[in-house]
Image (spheres, rainbow, N blue to C red):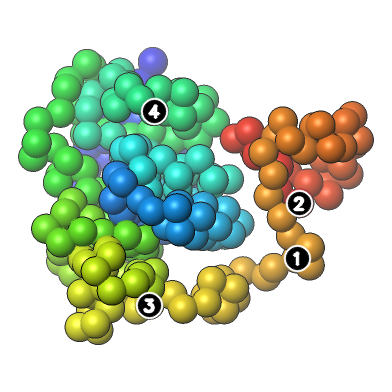
Amino acid sequence: MPKNITYQDYNLFYKGDINLLYTPKVAIVGTRRPSKYTKEMTALLSAKLSKKYTIVSGGAYGVDAVSHKNARKTIMVSPAGIDTIYPKINKNLIENIIDNNLMISEYEGSYMPKAYNFIYRNRIVVNISDFVIITEADENSGSMRSFEWAQKYNKKVFVLPHRINESKGSNYLARTNQAEVIWDIEEFILSLGIEEKENNKIMDFNEALLEYGDKLYEMELEGNVEIKNNRVYF
């Protein structure tokens, strides 16, 4: 059953671990049609940042889904009612978030979102986070609206570098010095006080099970790996 809570003047309904709302948080947002490069970099950022931060995103197809999937800790801000799985294409992911992390919404029941709900959803994604990363964004996109919310709430914005004529929205923010570019992910992670283990890697759970067999569970008990959200973190 969903519950409700007041947080930063928002009346929120939630399902999952509400304690995640009180952890350090970073928003990762971007296009619903990310390039292969963007998917890889978003997955890497989400996995590494979630050693210290809870990853906040909007549950949409594309960058949002990649961010949630690769995070150890994540919060989904839904534009729909708290009892509604939306979008349905991410049904398995969203159910996993509810079971193991946290989904929040301003709306109760089976409310289906209107166009304006996505912009309102973005303001919460941004405002509850310590800073924002836009990994790919077209001009006049929802991610650029998230940048506008970040300006309103005085949140620092980071972007990934992209080639000319790609991700024109985030490239514009970089070119006009309105966002800081993440030129090197390892340096960026270290600048946030996140120490990297030597030989650190992430594997799909089934792939790791095939490679390590029952030893994988022994490694987890010994604290040498963490198994979360169908991923294995070494």
**Disc 4: CA contacts within 10 A as few (<14), some (14-19) or many (>=20):** some
- Viewer-side label of 1, 4: 4
Residue 6 % position (x, y): 27, 40
Residue 192 is left or right of residue 199, and the answer is: left
Evaluate whether residue 113 shows in this view.
Answer: yes
Q: In the structure shown, which secondary structural element does the residue marked by tag 3 occupy?
A: strand
Q: CA distance from mark 2 to mark 1?
A: 9 Å
Q: Are marks 2 and 1 in contact (CB under 8 Å)?
A: yes
Residue plotted at (29% across, 27% down): 87
Residue 190 % position (x, y): 60, 76
Task: Compare marks 2 and 3 and give the one earlier in the sequence.
Answer: 3
Q: Which residue is mark 2?
A: 234
Q: Nearer the viewer, residue 106 or 26?
A: 26
Residue 100 is left or right of residue 88, and the answer is: right
Task: Compare marks 4 and 3 and give the one earlier in the sequence.
Answer: 4
Q: CA distance from mark 2 to mark 4?
A: 26 Å
Q: Amino acid at mark 1?
A: Lys
Q: CA distance from mark 2 to mark 3?
A: 28 Å
Q: In the structure shown, which secondary structural element does the residue marked by tag 1 occupy?
A: loop
Residue 232 % position (x, y): 71, 42
Q: Which residue is mark 4?
A: 90
Residue 142 % position (x, y): 18, 51
Residue plotted at (52% across, 77% down): 184
Q: CA distance from mark 1 to mark 4?
A: 32 Å
**Image quarter hosting the N terminus:** top left
Q: Are marks 1 and 4 in contact (CB under 8 Å)?
A: no
**Disc 1: CA contacts within 10 A as few (<14), some (14-19) or many (>=20):** few
Locate residue 94: give its quadrant: top left
Res. 181 mark: 3
Q: Which residue is mark 1?
A: 197
